[in-house]
Each structure stands twice: as C-alpha cells, then as structure tokens.
C-alpha cells in the first residue's frame, strides 16, 4: 500500500471518530458528502456512513457485487442485488436509523472494511455494523460485498 493510501486511511480513522457523523445528528449533515465510488476509499466510506445514517439501502448497494453476503443478527445469506435491496430496506424499516458512527476503516489491496456503530431509533442499545467492499483488479470502482449487523458486545 502506498504512503498516500496509508495517509488517507489514517485520516479517515481520525476524521471518522469525529462528530461529523455523530449520534442523533440530522442526516443532512452527511448527505452533502460526495457520493462518488471512484478513487480513494474516503468517498466510499462516506457513502456507507451516509447510507446507514439515512437508512438508504439503495445508496448502500450502489454499486454492489453480483452476490452480496448479508448477515443480520447471526443469520447469514447470499443475495442477488435485487434481493439484497429488499432485505436491507426491510432492515431499515424495522430498525429506522437514529445515528451512525464510523469506528474503524481498514484498506488492504483491493478490499476496504468499514466498522461502525448503528443506533436504531427504537432501541436503547446500538448495533455493530461491518461492511466489506472490494475492487476488481485494475478498476477504481468500490463494490459492496458484505454487510453484517449484530448486537453490540458492551
């Protein structure tokens, strides 16, 4: 990994822990974030954070791999794009967002991992979210490969 990418990852980790994607903060504060999925992982991390903060399954899945692995509370299944959209819309309907905070970002080669804390509006405890994105060799496009949501171990 080149030093520029390492610097960007470090910057994302430092910036990601800041208040710009804070608890209970209106979605508008991150809705203005660039929605580009090209280039450095920063834009794609912002897209993932905004999608969870807004409860926007379409934004989270654009673009995605042909098959997306979704694990909700221990139930793991692979879905087509259309099925994944339905499953994630249903998740956001049942667990409407109150806030999302990026906790960690790690990029290695053609993979990017985003870990965050998701606070549903009707729960007292937050949920732990893990997202894996990948690039095809020689492409700059980051595609969603996996979403995992589980209870936080507090």
Image (tube, helix red, strand yellow):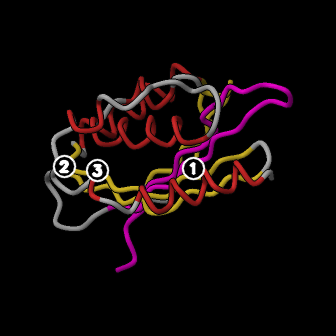
Q: Secondary structure at mark 3?
A: helix
Q: Disc 2 or 1, which lies upstream in sequence?
A: 1
Q: Is residue 113 left or right of residue 57?
A: right
Q: Is residue 153 visible?
A: yes
Residue 87, picture quadrant: top left
Q: Disc 3 or 2, which lies upstream in sequence?
A: 3
Q: Is the stretch drawn in magenta largely helix, strand or loop?
A: strand
Q: Residue at x 34, y 80 (%)?
A: 154
Label 3: which residue? 20
Q: Is residue 7 left or right of residue 17?
A: right
- In the image, residue 20 above or below residue 32: below
Q: Is residue 75 visible?
A: no
Which x, y percent locates residue 125? 23, 67
- In the image, residue 88 above or below residue 132: above
Which x, y percent locates residue 103? 44, 63
The reply to whether the magenta stretch includes residue 150 is: yes
Which x, y percent locates residue 55? 29, 36
Magenta extent = 127-154
The reply to whether the magenta stretch includes residue 96 is: no
Label 2: which residue? 98
Label 1: which residue? 76
Q: Secondary structure at mark 1?
A: strand
Q: Residue at x 60, y 24 (%)?
A: 80
Q: Disc 1 or 3, which lies upstream in sequence?
A: 3
Q: Find the residue positioned furthest to the top.
A: 82
Residue 110, picture quadrant: top right
Q: Secondary structure at mark 2?
A: strand
Q: Is residue 101 left or right of residue 12?
A: left
């Amino acid at each position: 990994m080149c030093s520029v990418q390492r610097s960007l990852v470090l910057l994302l980790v430092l910036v990601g822990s800041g208040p710009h994607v804070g608890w209970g903060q209106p979605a508008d504060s991150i809705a203005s974030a660039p929605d580009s999925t090209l280039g450095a992982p920063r834009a794609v991390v912002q897209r993932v954070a905004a999608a969870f903060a807004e409860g926007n399954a379409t934004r989270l899945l654009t673009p995605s791999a042909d098959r997306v692995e979704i694990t909700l509370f221990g139930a793991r299944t692979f879905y087509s794009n259309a099925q994944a959209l339905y499953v994630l819309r249903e998740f956001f309907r049942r667990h409407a967002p109150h806030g999302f905070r990026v906790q960690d970002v790690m990029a290695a080669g053609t993979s990017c991992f985003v870990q965050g804390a998701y606070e549903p509006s009707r729960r007292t405890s937050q949920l732990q979210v893990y997202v894996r994105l990948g690039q095809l060799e020689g492409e700059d496009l980051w595609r969603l490969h996996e979403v995992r949501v589980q209870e936080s171990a507090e």
